[in-house]
Image (cartoon, rainbow, N blue to C red):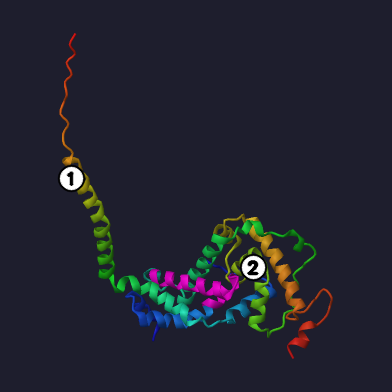
Amino acid sequence: MTEDLMLAGCINNDSASQEALYTRFSPRMLGVCYRFAKSREDAEDMLQEGFIKVFTQIRQYRNEGVLEGWIRKIVVHTCINILKKHKKFSDCVDISYANGIQTSEGNIPSVVQAKQVVECIRTLPIGYRTVLNLYAIEGYSHREIADMLDIEESTSRSQYTRAKGILEDILVKKNIILDSKRGIDFAAATLK
Amino acid sequence: MPTNHHTNSLEELLKQQTDEFKMIPSENTWKAIHKRTHSSRKYPSFTAIAVFLTIVFSARPLSSRHNDKVRHISAIPTQKKVVLVHKA
């Protein structure tokens, strides 16, 4: 089914078109939800809410930009709204992680398992993880993140810096990236 | 709208790897979405009838109770006024 046919069907609340759209985009969108969620079950709940919003708001899609991007934006906002009901992001700052961690550059191997990276992101505390997901992966600015999470822009910046530092440490420990500080080529063994 | 802020290799790695990450949702997720997007439109008359019957049946006992009360009040005999004449 072409994208235009699928869209036209979804506007008319046609089940087959909705299922086709869901089948095409749900695996990637569940991956997005999983990065934000506490568990797979929570991720599926987020996905469910997200797609219900997609189908109820499909008339608002104006063919400007990529359909996947439009769906993704709705899904991300749904994830944030669900998380906001359960968590105060401003309470998630842990200063102890911030000291002494610098982000290294130029030490990332080209081939890394996507699942490993996602699981490493999911080990971060919820506040750090959310800001990191929104800034580094979804591409939102700190101003936009501050508005979305009802926090200060400076809080978003500091949480991101800390999140990046912790994540880099985790990736080094898991042998996914190289530890440039200690000059040890961990990743070479892993990626053989 | 999201904009591109990726300035270093760690961010590039995250972006690339997470974009490739996919998971297959369970069948129940689609069933739940389908149910919620179609159930209310599938039987609109059924819902309307259910609401109507609920209103009718909840209003009927109230109405009969009111009638009983009116009947009960009308059945009470009016008391005759007794005039006491005090003879001095």
Residue B32, compared with residue A149, is above or below; it is below
Q: Residue furthest front?
A: B87
The residue that label 2 is drawn on is: A129
Left or right: B62 in relation to A66: left
Residue A124, compared with residue B13, is above or below; it is above
Q: Is residue A45 magenta?
A: yes
Q: Residue furthest bottom?
A: A192
Q: Residues within 10 Å of mark 1 (few under 14, many from 20)?
A: few
Residue B40, compared with residue A95, is above or below; it is below
Left or right: B52 in relation to A42: left
Instruction: Tell me the SS state at disc 2.
Output: helix
Viewport quadrant of the C terminus of chain B: top left
Image point 73% across, 88% down: which residue? A191
A139 and A92: which is toward the camera:
A92
Residue B2, image x, y percentages: 54, 67
Dominant secondary structure of the residues highlighted in magenta in the image:
helix
Mark closer to the observer (1, 2): 1
The chain containing the residue under callout 1 comes to B
The chain containing the residue under callout 2 comes to A
Left or right: B16 in relation to A183: left
Residue B54, image x, y percentages: 28, 61
Residue A83, quarter of picture = bottom right
Residue A121, compared with residue A157, is above or below; it is below
Query: Are the residues flagged by discs 1 and 2 from a single subunit?
Result: no
Residue B87, image x, y percentages: 17, 11
Q: Specify start and end residues of the magenta stretch as a single range.
A: A29-56
The residue that label 1 is drawn on is: B71
